[in-house]
Image (tube, coloured by chain):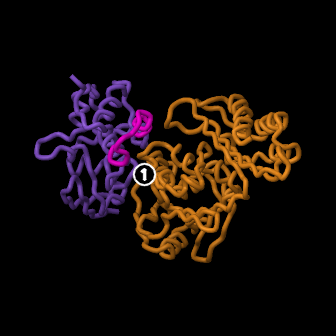
Chain colours: A purple, B orange
Amino acid sequence: MQVTLDLIVNGEDYRVTVPAKALLVEVIRDVVGLTGTKRGCDEGVCGSCTVLLDGKAVCSCSLLAVRAQGKQITTIEGLAKNGKLHPMQEAFINFGAIQCGYCTPGMILASKALLDENPKPSERQVREGIMGNLCRCTGYVKIVEAILACSQGKVAPDA
Amino acid sequence: MKDFEYLQPTTIQEACSMLAEYGTEAKIMAGGVSLLTLMKQKLVQPKYVVSLASIPNLDYINLDNGGLMIGGLTPHRAIEKSASLAKKWPILTEMAGNIGSVQVRNLGTIGGNLCHAEPASDPPAVLVGLNAAVKLVSAGGERVVPVEEFLVDFYETAINPDEILTEIQIPEQAAGSRGAYIKFNPRSAMDLPVVVVSAFVTPGGKKGTVKDVRIGLGAVSPRAIRARRSEEVLKSKGLTEEAVKEAGQLASEDIDPISDIRGSADYRREVTKVLVARALNKIK
């Protein structure tokens, strides 16, 4: 069964015709063409496919695209505005929270959603908030530092 | 995944008549997290997916008359974040917050969790301990089934193909009741539980006596169960150190755990014995 969907991705409207079984991650990457969102485990465990749906972090592999109609979908490409990086992106770069980069789009979106809901989290709350995003490279140390710094309005380590 | 017809009923009645028409060829999609996993693995290949997402008034938390009613389509995240639940039913806050990750909890629903009937899951053990029931609605009417009866076997419930779980009902707990809940998952934060213990005690008139006790055990049997022999011991002997130990021992005998990468059956028995006692000691 084919469905025609009106999707709002990063504030822009897309009308796509896809099979009903198309996952949101497939439509974002293969139809809309935004490949920042990664496909990892395909089971909703690794978080590399994380996008924001009306501001809430979800795994786009665990959602049919048809379910995302009428909602604001935010991908990693939607964070920078007019060429200026989002503070969370700046912080990740400046703290060295990126190594291979595969977890990064999902991790940054999950981190942004975390601070949007809880602007001054404790370290434990940060770690719990990114529980759904696996990173095989960094050991999470710099990621947690970057998020905590961002929550204090800083995007770089103190000189 | 195989192709399917995606249906979006806007009322419960519409959904029920679709389910009645398509029977076992249809599957209900609530949050869709567990269902999509099964469909991707081709364990379940419905011709029709009946989405509940367009039906209003299935996502709610009502604290009325001391009891609690939660809509079947309420996401775990809503239960986790509810301020009124945190005040009156903190065990449910903790239970919901222990499920998966934020991403999973934003999509997954409590009704979907119960209908999926994954044995290694927290809500069944807690809801069984709380004496909860579920409301099942079909074109022919509705019925209320205790969660303990609703859960039949692993991935199997008492729901009929034409029914929808619309509500979870938790009765008012007796005055003076105290509860504890322990999720044991030693590997990583997001892992499935290895053992889940919930315990709810209503103290008796005399100190140390027990008027009523319910112990829910999850992840250690094909479905969440009550540790009834343990409960009898505590009711007759009270919360003494000896009775608590015996309760743990009996619970470890009354379960039917599997061996898998998270632990052997023996390990699960041992941990159950320890955690039942620990939960009861938390309440003492």
**In the rendering, at what x and y percent does residue A126 appear?**
39, 36
Regarding residue A117, the answer to whether it shows in the image is yes
Nearer-the-camera pick, A7 or B134: B134
The residue beneath circle 1 is B106
**In the rendering, at what x and y percent does residue B147 appear?**
67, 57
Predominant secondary structure, magenta span? helix
Q: Residue at 28% across / 57% down in the picture?
A: A72
**In the rendering, at what x and y percent does residue A5 appear?**
27, 62
Amino acid type indicated by mark 1: Asn
- The chain containing the residue under callout 1 comes to B
User: Residue B222 vs residue B210: left or right?
Assistant: left
Q: What element does badge 1 sit on?
A: helix
Q: Is residue A135 above or below residue B44?
A: above
Q: Is residue B183 above or below residue A17?
A: above
User: Which residue is situated farthest in the left direction here?
Assistant: A82
Nearer-the-camera pick, B140 or B62: B62
Q: Quadrant of the C terminus of chain B?
A: top right
Q: Is residue A84 above or below residue B12?
A: above
Q: Is residue B265 magenta?
A: no
Nearer-the-camera pick, A3 or B242: B242
User: What segment carries the magenta color?
Assistant: A115-129
Q: Residue at 49% across / 67% down in the picture?
A: B58
- Where, by quadrant of the figure, is residue B249 drawn? top right
**In the rendering, at what x and y percent does residue B156 appear?**
63, 53
Q: Residue at 49% across / 43% down in the picture?
A: B100
Crowding around mark 1 (Cα neighbors within 10 Å: few <14, some 14 to 19, many 20+) is some
Nearer-the-camera pick, B112 or B271: B271
Q: Is residue A125 magenta?
A: yes
